[in-house]
Image (tube, grey):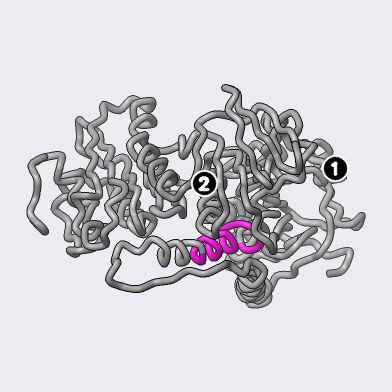
Amino acid sequence: MTQHSEFDLAVIGTGGAAMSAAIHARLEGASVVAIESGTLGGTCVNVGCVPSKTLLAAAHIRHAAISSPFPSVSTIAGNVDLAALMQQKDELVGMLRQTKYADIATAYGFEILPGTATFASPSTLLVDGQPVRAKSYLIATGAEPLIPAVPGIEQIEYLTSTTAMELTELPDSLVVIGGGFVGLEQAQLFARLGVDVTVIGRLASHTEPELSSELRKAFLDDGITVIGDRAASIARIDGLAHVTTARGTVAVGERVLVATGRTPRTERLDLAAAGIATDARGFVIVDELQRTTNPAVFAAGDVADAPQYVYVAAMAGKIAARNALGSAEHVDYTGLPSVLFTSPQLASAGITEADAIAAGYRCACRYLRLSDVPRAIANHDTRGGIKIVADADTGKVLGVHALADTAGEMMLAATYAIKAGFTVTQLADTWAPYLTMAEGIRLTANLFRNELPTSCCA
C-alpha cells in the first residue's frame, strides 16, 4: 500500500464483522484495506468460539466415557494431557486462521495492513502514525473480557476465557465468577476434564426459568457446585483463592476464572478525536444503518454492543459495508438464535416469555419435558425440555427454547418457522422425522391444541 492510496472502505479489525464487511465490499467492487494491530482473525477463531468449542468437545467425550448410560458397553477415561490437548487446539486454530482469514483476503483481493489504528481527526485515520485515506471507515475491533471491580481481585492471578485456554496443566480446583454463556461453558469444560469447579452467579439468567432450573440440575449432576449469588470480595490465603459472596458464602479454589461480561476494545482508537460517541459502558453508538455519530464512520460487531455472536457480527459487518457504499439496510433480528454449548445444550430462537410480555403480547406458552421426546428416551438422557412462546391472539410463534442434546441443531428450524411467521398449528402440522430431537418442537407445538399424551409418532 502506498501512502497516497485512497480506499473506498478501511476496516479496523479482522474478526467476524471486519472480514464480512471486507468481503461484501469487494463483492460490490469497492477497494478495501483491513487493519490489524494484533493476531489475524479476531476473537472467534483465536480465543473464542473455535478453541472453546473444540475443547468442550474433548471434555464431553471424556465425560461420556465416564457416565455412559449403557453399562453393557465398556468405556474408559484416563488422565488428561492438557498440554497435548492445547497443542491440538492451537493447530486447529492455526489452520482456520490461514484458510478462513489469510487465504480469504487473498481470494477476495484486499490487503491486511498490520499496525495500530488511531483517529487524528473526524476524517483522518493513522496506522502507526501513517495516514490511511478512505471514503468510509468501519470500526470492528471487537471486545475483550471485562474485569469486575471486586475487592481483592488484584491479589490473585485470575484467569479469563482467553488465558484459561492457554493453560498446560489442570488446576485441582477452580472458582468461576459469572453464570453467563462464557462462565458456564468454561465451568463444565474444566469440570469434565477432572477439575473441582464452583460457579458463582445466576445460571443462564437470560433464558426461560424452566430451562435454567434444569441446567442447574445438570451441573449439580456433573459435580459442579453452584452458588446463586455475586462475588463480593477475594482473598488469597495459604496459596488458595477465597471468594466470598454477597451473602457470606465462601468458595475456595486454586484458580479463579472471571467471566462477567465483555468490554469494547477501543482504547487506542481515540474516538473523541473523530467525533464518535460511546455509551456509558464504552460501546460505540450506532444507528440502525450501523453508522456512528461521525457520518463517515460505521461500526459493527461486539464493539457496538450488538448481541455477541459471531454470526451477528458478520451480518452487521455486511450491512455496514453495504451502507458505507450507499445502501440503506438494517439488521433484522427476528428469530435470532443462540446456543450455549454445555451438555445438554441450551438454545433459543426468538424471544422469551418475559420479553414477549414486556413487548405487549398476550402470551400462550407450552413446555414439554424431554422425558416425552422419543429421541431423548432412546438416548437414555431425558434431562431438559422444550418451550414454545406464542401470541395467544394469533397463534404466531414468537420463541422456541430448548435444553437438550443437540438443542443448537434444532434452532435453525425454529428460526425458519419464526421468520416465516408460522403459527403453532402450522408448526404442529409440519413434517418432523421420527427419533430426531427436532421432532420435539412439533410435539411441543401440538400441546397448544391437545395436552393429552401422544403415541410414539402421532
| x then y, percent, for residue 341 | 46, 54
- In the image, what residue type sits under mark 1? Ser
| x then y, percent, for residue 331 | 49, 47
Q: Is residue 369 magenta?
A: no
Mark 1 lies on residue: 121
Q: Is residue 150 above or below residue 346?
A: above
Q: Is residue 451 above or below residue 74?
A: above
Q: Nearer the viewer, mark 2 or mark 1?
A: 2
Residue at image coords 25%, 49% = 370
Frontmost residue, 402 versus 3: 402
Residue at image coords 15%, 39% = 448
Give the residues drawn in magenta, as a range: 45-58
| Left or right of 436, for residue 352 | right
Frontmost residue, 346 versus 198: 198
Secondary structure of residue under mark 2: helix
Task: Decide which of tag 2 and tag 1 comes sooner along the chain.
Answer: 1
Quadrant of the image containing the C terminus:
bottom left
- In the image, what residue type sits under mark 2? Leu
Q: CA distance from mark 2 to mark 1?
A: 42 Å
Task: State which quadrant residue 232 falls in.
Answer: top right
Q: Is residue 57 magenta?
A: yes
The answer to whether residue 451 of the structure is visible from this angle is yes
Question: Farthest residue toward the top?
Answer: 247
Question: Farthest residue toward the front?
Answer: 238
Question: Farthest residue toward the right?
Answer: 129
- Count numbered badges in the picture: 2
Mark 2 lies on residue: 184
| x then y, percent, for residue 254 | 68, 47
Judged by its main secondary structure, the magenta piece is helix
